[in-house]
Amino acid sequence: MRKKLCIIPSGILNPENTIESCFELTQAEILNDNYDITVFTVNIQTPLFVWLKYFVKKLLNYKYIEKLNFKFLILKIIEVIFWGIFNRYRLKTHFLKDVRVIEVLSYSFFAKSGFKNNLKHWVKAGIIGFEKYFIKRNKLPHLIMSHGRFLKAGVLAFEIFNKYKIKYTYTEYVTLYREAKAPDEAKDFLNKVLTNSSTNIFISDGIKDDVEKFLNHKVENYKIIPLPVERIYEEKPISFSVENNRNFVFTNIGYFSERKRQEFLIRAFKKAFMGKKNIILNIIGGGKLFQEYNDLVYKLDLKDVVNIIGYKKPAEIVEILDNSNTFVFPSKSETLGVVVIEALLRGLPVIATICGGPEYILNESLGILIPTDNEEELIKALIYMYNNLSKFDRYEIRKYAVKNYGRDKFLMRILPLIDEILSR
């Protein structure tokens, strides 16, 4: 009989939102071949008080909630009242990529404020949902693998361990520590999680250093295991369609934000090539800055050479990468940079900043490392790559990436660790 593993993300995972916990889902899909995997996810619903505020503001014609129509608001108010009264913590079952996902939806009438209150609310919903599904149905997992993305899943795993003595691992990979955004009151929780876990997992040496600096002491009992990448990046036969393309194409992928530095890249691209028609920049992602970046492209008269592209599925991204010459990653702060690995798996050389992640991935045969927020160095790197692309062997880049970051390598790192914990 296969051992039962429960993977707990700190974010939402359901058919409507596979992005927030995409790394956890990828790991679950890979491990599902070796273990009986269940992903357990907590979804704290918007409280009734907030929906009522939206409703009143809609009546008063506040412009910023124009997209919320009355019918939607009324249905949400009814939904929260009904479930808040009759089943405040309800379970839903999904199957994503052949992985069982159990989602506990928590309904409340009033909003919670403050770090501790929000954490307490999330963990309480998690405990109740865990007991409903795993305890009452006698489906206890042999091991819980919790994923931080800041702490919540780790605290839930710790509380389950305290109550039911189920072992857990804790994986951390957020940039909050480096950006000084993690509150001091999180230290006690983080210390408990790290001290009681069977093994702590960091996706790079950089995030381990960030956590140790935040706690002001060394972390014991840890492994460095980079995040796995969706299968299609490795398994789809490589096709360098770009060889038949007259344009030189740079591509960037990431959530549109100040931290990811897409605006910085657009302005540097403008100065590097002054709108030459045969040099293209694709920026793939999404977020609140989507329209702002489109406006910037028009303002800089780059609409014919810079493409601001929304979210794309992995298969679509693979096609775009195969039609690109170079991947550009100008981020200010990262804990790894999975998109860099994805690009390498498609054989692309990479220009990346030394921002906490890429420097642990790249070497001189894979691309160019530059300082963060240094426009002159970014411009030089863009021009160099345009003039010297032939110095980078796409097949060798892909070969290196598969060997060091492919599915087999991930399994070589994670399986012995899991089996050793289970045998204790």
Image (cartoon, helix red, strand yellow):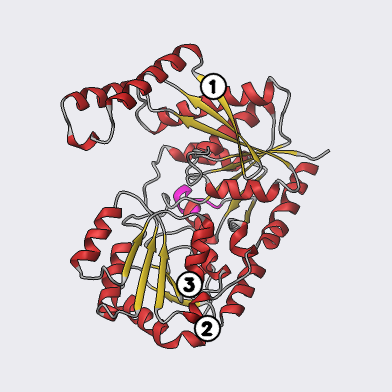
> From mark 3 to mark 2, how far is it between C-alphas?
16 Å
Question: Within the magenta stretch, is there residue 150?
Answer: no
Judge whether residue 16 can be spotted in this image: yes
The amino acid at mark 2 is Phe
The amino acid at mark 3 is Asn
Please indicate whether residue 266 sits to the left or right of residue 127 in the image: left
Query: Which quarter of the image is occupied by the N terminus?
Result: top right
Question: Could you tell me which residue is drawn at 70 percent across and 45 percent down?
Answer: 32
Local SS, label 2: loop
Query: Residue 15, relative to residue 309: is it above or below?
Result: above
x%, y% of residue 72?
Answer: 33, 27
Question: Could you tell me which residue is drawn at 52 percent across and 75 percent down?
Answer: 241
> From mark 3 to mark 1, how far is it between C-alphas?
45 Å
Question: Could you tell me which residue is drawn at 27 percent across and 25 percent down?
Answer: 70
Mark 1 or mark 2, which has the lower sequence index?
1
Please report the bounds of the magenta region as a residue range.
212-218
Nearest to the observer: residue 103 or residue 301: 301
Judge whether residue 358 can be spotted in this image: no
Contact, mark 1 vs mark 2 (Cβ under 8 Å): no
**Residue 90 — which label?**
1
x%, y% of residue 361?
Answer: 54, 69
Local SS, label 3: loop
Q: Which residue in the protein does label 2 denote? A: 392
Q: Which residue in the protein does label 3 denote? A: 323
Outermost left residue? 60
